[in-house]
Amino acid sequence: MGQFFPTANDPLGKFSLQPMPTKSASPSNYLSFTDGDNDFAQQYLPELYEAEVERYGNRTLSGFLRMVGAEMPMTSDQVVWSEQNRLHIGYENGAGDLSVTVTDAANGAITLGSEHINSIRIGATIVIQNKVASPDVDAGKVVKAYVSGVAGNIITALPYTEASLNVSFDTSDPVNLFVFGSEFVKGSDRMPGSLEASFTQFNNKPIIIRDNYEVTGSDAAQIGWVEVAAEDGTSGYLWYLKSEGETRLRFQDYLEMAMVEGELNTNGVTAGTVGALLGDNSGTEGLFAAITARGNVYQNYASGAGAGGAGTRSALGDFDLILANLDKQGAIEENMLFLDRATSLDFDDMLAAQNSYGAGGTSYGVFENSEEMALNLGFDGFRRGSYDFYKTDWKYLNDATTRGLVDNVEGVLVPAGTSTVYDQMLGTNIRRPFLHVRYRASEADDRRMKSWITGSVGGAATSSFDSMTVNFLSERCLVTQAANNFVLFTKS
């Protein structure tokens, strides 16, 4: 039994205890500091939870490209691919040098802008529509005509049902036109010239992505255990490399995020402006950049304002405009929608409004569609027109530290399946997913996802630094083929 021993500073011996030889609680070895702040030697430690609390759930964001694409090695500094151009011949009036204009209505002259390549030949039959602004009386009028002459980018069109073009067109009227066939008289010679198939070539370059984690020898010698359940499926206890594990997970997310957000450097940033270690910063074309440059961008979906804030439309009206544009492109039958939370709910509301089952179009969907047992207000897939759509939430667009913080992108429509392209290296047509990642690799070095240890701690003996550095590196780029079939949903 312990005893109290009075001292000069503690005449009652209140704080002087005799310790017990075993871990047992008794009045003589009980430390009480309720009447003061002398808690520097508190014997009974706080109750400690070894396991981390997963307060943010699964924090990783990668997985999008694994769902819609593939990864393939390459050995070059650049990946080049070719895509088919359209089969039929049509010209749309545009701005500047892309104009298509009636330049002499009385004589049937139509001039293509200088950047148009004229593929219309004598003998062709064409459909012409007047694109003059409403409420002009001739706005939208359509005539069919025979091409009697071609001189450079000027064609002479003779209408079938009118005396001349000036019946439905004025000189300087903008027009759209396309070729629907040809007509020749008996005994005529062949159609002059021939059409050569053309293709459009695209390219992208890989970027080097790097990260590292460093721990000193002193910190490595102070062992502390933490029980974790990591996002990669592992669980158990980690020593001082807990931070290394999170660095690896973060880096794996960066591998996908860089492919989604990458931008080509169009401002010529050089080593002098970005630092000597980085050198020329040429960038890479990511998914969002590729769709913006070569695909379709729809603003303010389901906002009631329509595309670009013009007009007034419902969510279904907006979606039908998107379908009409897909009809003009490759018309891929199956598509996937990766959406943020707000846009996903807009789609649910749009679909529920079209459903005739239940009160107010409500779907129950689970537990044998029982209204009493469960209510399902979400939709995973639907069909509209000739297209099938599969909808899912994209966590990357909702996370508070990524696109949930910078929220101008609301979703993306990605065509499913594969495309046929001409591979410049193989010299043949090959089938590839519309989205796929190319990474640098050879027999000597695989740069898909490299990791190595340097320093003098933890088994490494590569330098004199009293630390261990875990290095991560990858060199890759994204190939976005047939970007005209993708749709990016954005805010204005």
Image (spheres, rainbow, N blue to C red):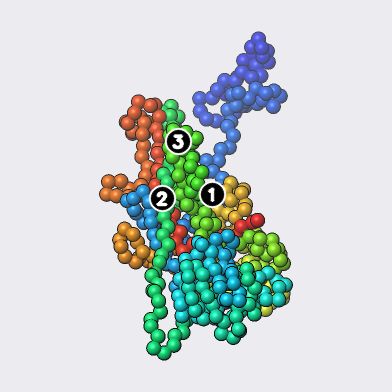
Q: Earlier in the sequence, mark 3 or mark 1?
A: 1
Q: Position of residue 103 (x, y in %)?
A: 59, 69
In this rendering, does residue 182 appear at all?
yes
Q: Earlier in the sequence, mark 1 or mark 2?
A: 1
Q: Around disc 3, counting alpha carbons within 10 Å, would you say few (fewer than 14), some (14 to 19), or many (20 or more)?
A: few
The three-letter amino acid code for the residue at tag 1 is Arg
Query: Which image quadrant for residue 218?
Result: top left
Camera-side mark, 1 or 2: 2
- Give residue 59's mark: 1
Give the farthest residue toward the top.
8
At 38% across and 83% down in the image, what residue appears? 189
Between the C-alphas of marks 3 and 1, the distance is 35 Å
Viewer-side residue, 435 vs 5: 435
Between the C-alphas of marks 3 and 2, the distance is 18 Å
Q: Around disc 1, counting alpha carbons within 10 Å, would you say few (fewer than 14), some (14 to 19), or many (20 or more)?
A: some
The three-letter amino acid code for the residue at tag 2 is Lys
Image position of 47 with respect to 76: above or below = above
